Amino acid sequence: MARTPLEKSAEPDLGTDLIPKERYVSREFMERESDRMWSRAWLMAGTLSDISEVGDFFTFEIGRESIIVVRSAADRIDAFHNACQHRGYRVCEAERGHGKTFVCPYHLWAYDLAGKLRGVPDREDYPQGIPDDTRLAPVRCDTWGAWVFVNMDLGAESLSEYLGEAGGHLDGYHFDRNYALTEDITFEWNCNWKVGVDAFNEVYHVQGIHPELLEISDDVDCPIDLYGKHSRFLFKIGVPSPRWTDTKAQAAGYRDRGEVTKEMATVLEAFGLDPKDYDDRIEEIRPALITSLREAAGPANLDFDDLHDEQLWLDVHYSFFPNITFNISPGHFWLFRHRPHPTDPNKMYWDYQNYDRIPRNSEPPPRPTHRFAVWGDGQEKDLHIALRQDGDAAAPIQAGMRSRGFKGLHLAAQERRIRLFHKVLGEYVDG
């Protein structure tokens, strides 16, 4: 099993051009994305655990498209456009379910689990006949980790080729057996879907809207790596930022930056370590936490075998083009999926999922109910404070982008994951 590489990768020259704001606000650009990118990229559709038995299915909504993903046989998964071949009615309105056929509720045309048409009321009434090979329009599908991916382009490269080396980087986490989905919420945000992607692709904003993170994480020494279409950064937890200066520490009520903060003390105490032992020795905190977590893994029956020690206190943060973000820690990870609104470039759907690590050979907890919420209706109150801050920032960013006084994104080097994203997006939309 190959472990996640931690060494720095070579980087391409991405230039320094302004990223035009029209990519975020233009309906015309939104249509080109739909026609040229969403229809050709590999997209994470859902979790394998939702289709564990033959006949299990779920639907995946992306823009104006709806796709059915079904376990059609014990060793086979199929995907189809959710449109009856009679007059286009969606044959499946349920988010998830189980059955033996898909029956259009309008005129009762019936399709089997492989998408083939099996039943038509009054079939003799069609003077032109109905071809024997009529079926729901297929969509390519494949699996990686704990998820099903789909691609509407039947001639597209394979999922393995699409993910490239970045896909193999995360094998050591064993997402399919070590983690279970424990929270599943879709929020509507008042911004373009790319604002959502951008929010999680750089740490330049930490000092602005996440100042409390400066006490416990390093937003300066944060290696960035670019892998074809995809990217990552490695965010160190358990060490204060160089921006957490004596001045800032004193303003927060501490002696200086060498004093263990309340936030850091809470982490240390959770692992049975005395915070007082680390005053003026804060550089020893992270190694101590790594040792403690490794020692705790055995008694807890947790599988950290294929993770480097360094990973045990890293936010291993990967972005898979176009719209998937992983925030991975050994004990849990967040998966964010950023989806476009069907008609409005100023709105998006932000899918938030939390996965918790489960002990070896244990049964996963029951699947959580998927909830839908509009940001600001109160359902975001239980999210981590940093996620609430990111969500709160989305609408003001979109509003500013619509200003006549704003021309486009003027990106720093530490925001080059965003620049790579736009390079790849341009290759789809303009190439």
Image (cartoon, helix red, strand yellow):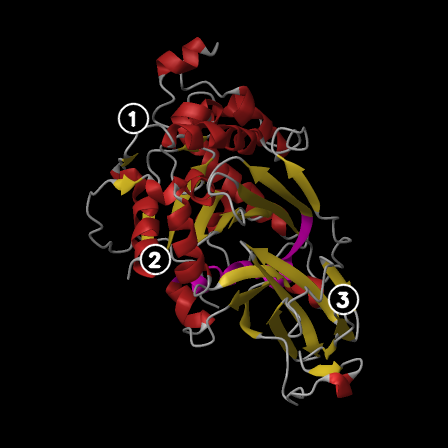
Residue 8 lies, in percent from the top left, at 30, 52
Which numbered disc covers residue 429?
A: 2
If you read the primary sequence from the N terminus, does the residue marked by circle 2 or circle 1 appear first? 1
Residue 161 lies, in percent from the top left, at 40, 71
Residue 256 lies, in percent from the top left, at 40, 14
If you read the primary sequence from the N terminus, does the residue marked by circle 2 or circle 3 appear first? 3
Under mark 2, the amino acid is: Val
Q: Is residue 28 left or right of residue 57?
A: left
Q: On screen, 408 above or below 255?
A: below
The magenta region covers 166-182
Of residues 117 and 181, the one drawn nearer to the viewer in this rendering? 117
Which secondary structure dominates the residues rendered in magenta?
A: helix
Residue 173 sits inside the magenta stretch: yes
**What residue sits 50% from the left and 43% below the top?**
344
Q: On screen, 409 above or below 10?
A: above
Q: On screen, 76 above or below 181?
A: below
Q: Nearer the viewer, mark 2 or mark 3?
A: 3
If you read the primary sequence from the N terminus, does the residue marked by circle 3 or circle 1 appear first? 3
